[in-house]
Image: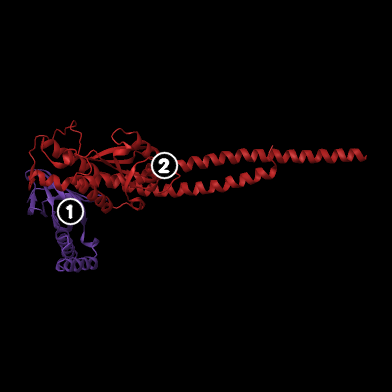
């Protein structure tokens, strides 16, 4: 059995760890509330944008447009949104694993546009080529950041250097459920099955014309998806960290309880032993 | 009395405006338009300009920078990337931006992205007009 001093030292160290995890949990709870509110406010733009794109594509039938068909290049780009900091449970690993596991994104044909250092390092280790790193964006995502990334990727897509663009982010379903998601940004693919009946028959007019409107809207659509993804990811990150820190705190508490018990037993044992020794000594003299 | 229609203006960060309007005026890439209720369905791209919302009680102004709008007979949705009410505009910053853009345009630099500089100038002018 470990000595009393050892147990005491161990317990103190776990106690200070618990304090840290508790503080981190509180911090991420506050951050989670903020980022959740932000994500919810932007969700509307995000959904309306998606609906609009769907309805435009549905109504205009089979139009030919450069953003609607895959480029000739077999290279693919993926925007991987992870966090800059660890201690968030499986949050970062889930994204990395999802990218590695997807058939569309083999390591040799994929360029990674990393947002978040953890994902960048993790994917670099798995032999993915990191084309660009926007890790500072994740600290305070702004719409302009998403627009800049969109502009750069669209430029490459138009030049034919990449054929498809994906977005990997963590969808914030609720505080405890976060789902890693892989979304195809370009070529634009929409769910044609769900027809909205009330608007189905209206004939939409486009000014100046469909082509120009799509030219203008698709970049906005992409930036809005990226921006929405960023906000969702930040909320998920804080949620994941909160859960991870909560269970770490619970584990620490459990360990402290166990060690306290051990410590008290050892203390009692020491006292009993001392008493036995004294009594034995007194007996020997008497 | 003009008929009312539902108007929503949404930016990535928040719902900018939602209400009933008689008419909405704005500038698209094709020119200035004013939309009343029962307009034909239309999708157009927004150019930087002043947005005027004609409500029952009066006219509201805002600066609208980019985005697109979707017009339906009974509702109009403007998906704005950037939209600002007069009180949100920093006049000094807009003035600075205007000077900067003008200087860029006059520099005759071969590498100058003229359309971008013109857009920046346009944005600054719209902000100044709405902000005053």
Residue A161 horizontal/vertical position (percent) = 22, 44
In-front residue for pair A132/B78: A132
Q: Is mark 2 on a helix, strand or loop?
A: helix
What mark, if any, has residue B66 been given in the picture?
1
Residue at x-position 77% and y-position 38%? A272
In-front residue for pair A103/A39: A103
Residue B36 horizontal/vertical position (percent) = 8, 49
Mark 2 burial class by Cα count in 10 Å: few <14, some 14-19, many 20+: many
Which chain letter matches label 1? Answer: B
* Chain A rendering hue: red
Q: Do the residues labelled 1 and 2 touch (CB within 8 Å)?
A: no
State which quarter of the image contains the C terminus of chain A. Answer: top right
Residue B31 horizontal/vertical position (percent) = 7, 55
- For the question of whether residue B6 can be seen, the reply is no
Residue linked to disc 2: A240
* Chain B rendering hue: purple
To which quarter of the image does residue B74 belong? top left
């Amino acid at each position: 059995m470990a000595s009393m001093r050892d147990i005491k030292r161990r317990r103190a160290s776990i106690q200070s760890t618990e304090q840290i995890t508790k503080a981190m949990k509180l911090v991420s709870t506050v951050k989670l509330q903020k980022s959740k509110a932000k994500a919810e406010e932007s969700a509307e733009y995000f959904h309306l944008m998606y609906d609009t794109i769907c309805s435009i594509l549905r109504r205009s039938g089979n139009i030919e447009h450069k953003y609607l068909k895959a480029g000739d290049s077999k290279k693919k780009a993926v925007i991987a949104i992870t966090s800059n900091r660890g201690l968030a449970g499986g949050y970062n690993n889930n994204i990395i694993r999802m990218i590695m596991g997807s058939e569309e994104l083999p390591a040799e044909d994929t360029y990674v546009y990393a947002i978040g250092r953890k994902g960048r390092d993790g994917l670099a280790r798995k032999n993915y080529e990191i084309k660009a790193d926007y890790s500072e964006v994740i600290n305070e995502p702004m719409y302009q950041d998403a627009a800049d990334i969109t502009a750069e990727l669209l430029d490459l897509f138009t030049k034919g250097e990449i054929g498809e663009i994906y977005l990997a982010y963590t969808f914030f379903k609720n505080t405890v459920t976060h789902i890693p998601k892989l979304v195809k940004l370009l070529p634009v693919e929409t769910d044609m099955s769900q027809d909205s009946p009330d608007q189905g028959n209206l004939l939409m007019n486009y000014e100046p014309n469909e082509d120009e409107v799509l030219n203008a809207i698709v970049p906005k659509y992409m930036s809005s998806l990226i921006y929405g993804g960023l906000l969702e990811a930040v909320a998920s990150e804080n949620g994941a960290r909160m859960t991870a820190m909560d269970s770490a705190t619970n584990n620490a508490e459990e360990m402290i309880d166990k060690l306290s018990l051990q410590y008290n037993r050892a203390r009692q044992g020491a006292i009993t032993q001392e008493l036995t020794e004294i009594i034995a000594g007194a007996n020997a003299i008497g | 009395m003009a008929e009312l229609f539902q108007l929503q203006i949404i930016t990535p960060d928040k719902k900018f405006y939602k209400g009933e309007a008689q008419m909405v005026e704005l500038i698209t890439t094709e020119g200035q338009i004013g939309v009343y209720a029962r307009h034909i369905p239309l999708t157009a791209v927004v150019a930087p300009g002043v947005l005027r919302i004609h409500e029952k009680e009066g006219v509201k102004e805002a600066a609208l920078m980019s985005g697109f709008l979707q017009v339906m007979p009974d509702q109009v949705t403007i998906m704005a990337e950037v939209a600002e009410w007069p009180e949100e505009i920093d006049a000094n910053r807009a003035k600075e931006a205007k000077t900067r853009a003008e200087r860029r345009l006059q520099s005759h630099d071969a590498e100058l992205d003229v359309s971008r500089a013109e857009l920046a100038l346009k944005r600054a002018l719209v902000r100044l007009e709405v902000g005053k």
